[in-house]
Amino acid sequence: MFKLAGKLTELHNGNEFKVKSFMGNAFKIERLPLPLESMSPEEIEKIEGIGKGTQAKIIEIIASGTLKDLDQLVSETPVGVFEMLSLKGLGPKKVRTIWKELEAESVGELLYACNENRLIDLKGFGDKTQQQVIESIEFIQENSSKFIYAKLEPIALQLIENIQKSNVSELVSLTGEIRRRCIELEKIELVVAEGKDVSLFLKHQNEFEISEMKTEEGKISFRINKSIPVEIFLCKKEDFYSTLFKTTATPEHLSLIVNIEISAASSEEEIYKNAGWNFIIPELREGKFEKKFNEQNKLNDIVQLNDLRGILHNHTTYSDGVHTLEQMANYCKDLGYDYLGISDHSQYAVYAKGLKLEQIIQQHKEIDSLNEKLKPFKIYKSIEADILPDGKLDYNDEILASFDFVVASIHSAMKMDEAKATARLISAIENPYTTILGHPTGRLLLSRPGYPIDHKKIIDACAANNVVIEINANPNRLDIDWTWIPYCMEKNVMIAINPDAHKMEGYHDMHYGTLAARKGGLTKQMTFNALYLKEIEKWFRSSGT
Ligand SMILES: [Zn+2]
Ligand SMILES: [Zn+2]
């Protein structure tokens, strides 16, 4: 407790001598030959080398279990900041810098900042600290009970491949929440047909560490690498599709598909056909929107990754990205896309090296010459303009007008009530230069809930002002939440699937963004970056900037 009090005093920038005294006492107490709790107050008062004041505190702790000074410090420290103190490589001073300068108040926010390379530029930090922090946080997260989709997908696919290769069974599929592409999930679920030997196979493969294996009627469950729960449903070959159908859907979805005989179905398509339905993709089988989509006959138009023609909202070394503008452009072109939007941070985002006017001018020159070199591929000039606390954007109109499009996002002062957050966003949406509303709630899955907003009012404002809404494809964000996509489409608000890439590999997050968009039934027609170059060019020309 003395050590913790010392750390917290330092964290809160308290008196240096106080810090030293707490730490010194902790050091001495640790080295006492006898446990203090077995000593009487009289004995404690006789310990040499420990001052009277400290002796009194020790007696207080033994009697009450608490230390007043410490309680006060704990109550002033956000839980997430408190957790950071236990991360390897971070002392109280560094945690304070992270808390005060990056405004990160949870371990998840800190991890996100590390992945965006923000730690290395803070005073007293470096590459090594950042890497240590990442590893330390990932360890803690692996031991908590929920996972983001991107964490489980590669493991699940590898597991399927291994089972198929081993000849245990060829009929293997994802099922349950991972097949529905839920954005946060508890486990991996698979269906395996005729997989009698699957448990034997699992015991003898060495790619993953398998533990806690349990077998019951028709089901095997176990953990991978001591953390990820896996459930395998076993069935006969002829029951594969009916089992897949039943284990994929939520009970709400199953209750919609009624009065049909599903055993021995030869495909899921057959099951839906017999029920008088169009085929429902697994993503939609939540019992939420599929009935309406089925009636509106929109199920064939749902967006796919290869419908996307361009990649918008990306960062370069001009702000906090890892790769240069040229590298980002070449890689985008190599992947077969027709256009790229470069949206580095604006000047208000000092932590992310937001662009000053001279850098904007320099970047625009570089874009012009690259466009000459790479045509018909096109790089669009953009900026991720901070939405300031009063709702204004971070540059004057003249500068805003120099971009092809503007992404407006909130990155600071995120502690707001719903009314304030909604008003702040609406004022940015009403700015004639705003093209896309970036990550509308600022949430980070499993670690930061995001500020509360009135989604309907925000979407209505976007409709009125011809503003596109982003679904940020970073698998930690997936913001706007997919459940709002149907309302966006109803209001004719287009959605851009944006990777917010801070390095070349970041483009591949569009895979996760697309899956989340499909969960909300987003159609190709309503996907902003599924527009062809000529169409999007026309949009940029006709909109505010
Ligand atoms: Zn952003
Ligand atoms: Zn961004």
Image: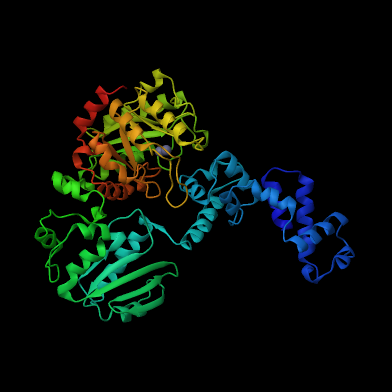
Left or right: residue 531 versus residue 103 is left
Q: Considering only vertical position in the picture, is 420 above or below 298?
A: above
Residue found at x 29% / y 62%: 176
The quarter of the picture where residue 185 lies is bottom left
**Residue 456 in sight here:** yes
In the image, residue 476 lies at what x, y percent? 40, 49
In the image, residue 485 lies at what x, y percent? 28, 42
The quarter of the picture where residue 155 lies is bottom left
Q: Please name whichever residue, 356 or 447, is drawn nearer the observer in this view of the structure.
A: 447
Q: Considering only vertical position in the picture, is 74 above or below 400?
A: below
Q: Residue furthest top?
A: 398
Q: Considering only vertical position in the picture, is 255 above or below 336?
A: below
Left or right: residue 339 versus residue 279 is right
Left or right: residue 495 versus residue 223 is left
Pick the quarter of the image with the N terminus. bottom right
In the image, residue 380 lies at what x, y percent? 30, 31
Left or right: residue 443 versus residue 246 is right
Tell me which image quadrant ligand 1 sits in: top left
Q: Please name whichever residue, 247 or 123, is drawn nearer the observer in this view of the structure.
A: 247
